[in-house]
Image (tube, rainbow, N blue to C red):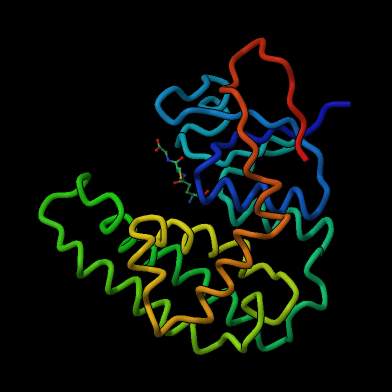
């Protein structure tokens, strides 16, 4: 049997989304770990835009992380019943906010050397302001919408993790986002996060196959 192929990069937050949903939905694939400065030709042929994750199925190629998550949820809705109806729209709004605004400011804060004339503190603050807004929806629980993991958690926590890593001491000392800090720590400590962070050798043509999950 030919399994789907997932091109992935361990530290990429978008690829983490894909690995988490494949793990949660128990969809087995062949995992090919890539280096972003040495992308395999086969991956670029399948998806010329050259970003990970890329999921190659028998009948189609999915090269956007959100589309991979939605494709897997269509097969098995592993989050069914974990959120209320009114949280569905909120989830989609927050995902857009993170993929658009939060990511924009995160890049300029974390990778300021890649941009000209950036005000690092401004971008740090803009991210923090988004997190303060998000803080208001958390209700003393371990995940954003209660004590069960939901789509929002797997889609945005990899980015909040990156924000923390940029200056861990500063992030941990913030007094006004205790819910975010708790949810993030719960995520970092969770089996699902740990299970998608195994290190693999870089894949190249002829490598032994690695199956995931
Ligand atoms: N919108 C894409 C974004 C994926 C993305 O930008 N991935 C980064 C790594 S985190 C990448 O592959 N960048 C290409 C490069 O750096 O060459 C998705 O959601 O899948």
Can you name the residue that lies furthest to the right here? 1
Q: Splitting the image into 4 quarters, where does residue 31 fall?
A: top right
Q: Quadrant of the N terminus?
A: top right
Q: Position of residue 16 (x, y in %)?
A: 59, 49
* Residue at horizontal 67 percent and vertical 14 percent from the top: 207
* Residue at horizontal 41 percent and vertical 61 percent from the top: 164
* Residue at horizontal 39 percent and vertical 77 percent from the top: 130
Q: Splitting the image into 4 quarters, where does residue 91 fall?
A: bottom right
Out of 25 and 55, give the one closest to the viewer. Answer: 25
Out of 184 and 63, give the one closest to the viewer. Answer: 184
Q: Is residue 206 left or right of residue 136?
A: right
Q: Quadrant of the C terminus?
A: top right
Q: Is residue 17 left or right of residue 102?
A: right
Q: Splitting the image into 4 quarters, where does residue 193 fall?
A: bottom right
Q: Position of residue 119 (x, y in %)?
A: 15, 63
Out of 161 and 32, give the one closest to the viewer. Answer: 161
Residue 81 to residue 6: above or below: below
Q: Position of residue 109 (x, y in %)?
A: 27, 59
Residue 31 to residue 79: above or below: above
Q: Position of residue 148 (x, y in %)?
A: 75, 74
* Residue at horizontal 74 percent and vertical 86 percent from the top: 84
Give the number of marks: 0
Can you name the residue that lies furthest to the left here? 117
Can you name the residue that lies furthest to the top here? 206
């Amino acid at each position: 049997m030919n399994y789907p192929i997932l091109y992935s990069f361990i530290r990429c937050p978008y690829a983490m989304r894909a690995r988490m949903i494949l793990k949660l939905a128990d969809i087995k694939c062949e995992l090919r770990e890539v280096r972003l400065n040495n992308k395999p030709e086969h991956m670029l042929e399948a998806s010329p835009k050259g970003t990970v994750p890329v999921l190659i199925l028998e009948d189609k190629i999915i090269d956007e992380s959100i589309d991979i998550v939605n494709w897997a949820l269509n097969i098995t809705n592993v989050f069914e019943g974990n959120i209320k109806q009114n949280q569905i729209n909120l989830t989609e709004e927050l995902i857009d906010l993170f993929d658009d605004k939060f990511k924009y400011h995160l890049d300029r804060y974390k990778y300021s050397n890649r941009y000209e004339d950036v005000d690092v503190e401004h971008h740090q603050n803009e991210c923090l302001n988004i997190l303060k807004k998000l803080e208001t929806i958390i209700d003393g629980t371990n995940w954003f919408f209660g004590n069960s993991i939901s789509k929002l958690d797997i889609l945005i926590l990899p980015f909040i993790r990156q924000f923390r890593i940029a200056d861990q001491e500063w992030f941990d000392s913030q007094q006004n986002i205790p819910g975010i800090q708790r949810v993030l720590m719960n995520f970092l400590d969770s089996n699902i996060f740990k299970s998608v962070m195994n290190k693999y050798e870089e894949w190249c043509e002829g490598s032994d196959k690695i199956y995931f999950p």
